[in-house]
Amino acid sequence: MCIYFKKEKDRYQYKDFSTDNGGDCVDLVQKMLGIDTRLNTMHKIVRDYNEFVLHNNGGYDLQVFKQYNKYKIDRYEVRQWNTLDKSYWSKYGIGSKMLEHYNIKPLSSYTMFKEEDGIYKVLNIEGSNIYGYFKKDGTLVKIYQPKVQKKKFLKVKDYVQGSDQLSGNNTLVIVSSLKDGMCLKKMYPGIDFLAPDSENTMIKKEYLDGISTNYKNCYILFDNDDAGNRAVIKYHSQFNYLKIIYLPFSKDISDSIKDHGYQKIKEYLDNNYDNIYYFW
């Protein structure tokens, strides 16, 4: 969620990317409290403010909020692949050659730091199943920690995943994650794919329009949930040449393969979409 200043309306607004809700302060209060109309929400705000002023002797304290710096990735340690890595990735049909092709490396640890009032705070994170996503030139762009409940992804730099590996094949697919793209590539070696930083991140129109001319077919396959469905609609409204693939199994294609098996998912794709032969 973010709060930003909208110049055209000369006011602050909010945007919640997980629910796609947004608006001004009244809209936010209405959503938070579940009030039926905007008018009743404004009455509620006025009543609460008057009560607040009354209980504070006709005044209020001015609060100063300090903006704190975020932690940044400082350094990392690359290690060798091991049996734990094999156990994790093989559930999705992804092997070491595919991981290496997309510049994914196993990490033993990484360090984060931030500076506040001249004091440096450092966090050193160690563990198994930590992976670095890299660009072709060796730049770290993201850290993936699938076993961590929160902060599975730590973004380091902006990057459209899969862009370094484009080869101008017959088919291009926009997917929600690098892992999903690799699962699809395992099924159909002849495709290319792109994965934005998240489903809420739009690939720049001039970039996608430019490269799409190299392909006979362009598809989009995002997560099978509310956020994924909203993102598909948003992408399709801007890029109407994207054909929509809907996979009615688990949340995404990688989980669908893990839960239902490689062969079942491939048979479904083969039998339900026109021009699927271009995948080869």
Image: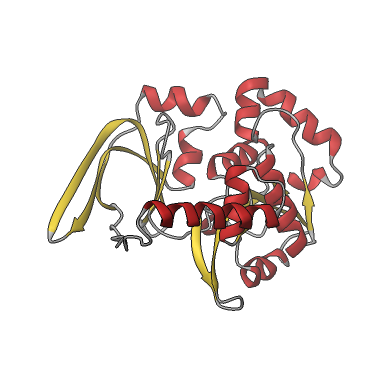
Picture layout, residue 81 above or below residue 64? above
Quarter holding residue 38? bottom right
Relative to 3, 173 lies left or right: right
Picture layout, residue 66 above or below residue 195? below
Asked whether 252 or 182 is in front, the reply is: 252
Q: Residue at x 64, y 42 (%)?
A: 34
Residue 237 is situated, as x and y percent measured from the top left of the image, at: 77, 61
Q: Residue at x 67, y 52 (%)?
A: 40
Asked whether 206 or 69 is in front, the reply is: 69
Residue 199 is situated, as x and y percent measured from the top left of the image, at: 60, 50
Q: Quadrant of the C terminus?
A: top right
Residue 147 is situated, as x and y percent measured from the top left of the image, at: 41, 28
Quarter holding residue 216? bottom right
Counting every numbered tag in the picture gives: 0
Quarter holding residue 248? top right
Asked whether 177 or 97 is in front, the reply is: 177
Asked whether 213 or 228 is in front, the reply is: 228
Residue 60 visible, this orientation: yes
Picture layout, residue 269 above or below residue 58? above
Picture layout, residue 147 above or below residue 4? above
Residue 176 visible, this orientation: no
Q: Residue at x 56, y 58 (%)?
A: 46
How is this picture coloured? secondary structure
Residue 232 is situated, as x and y percent measured from the top left of the image, at: 72, 50
Residue furthest to the left in view is 118
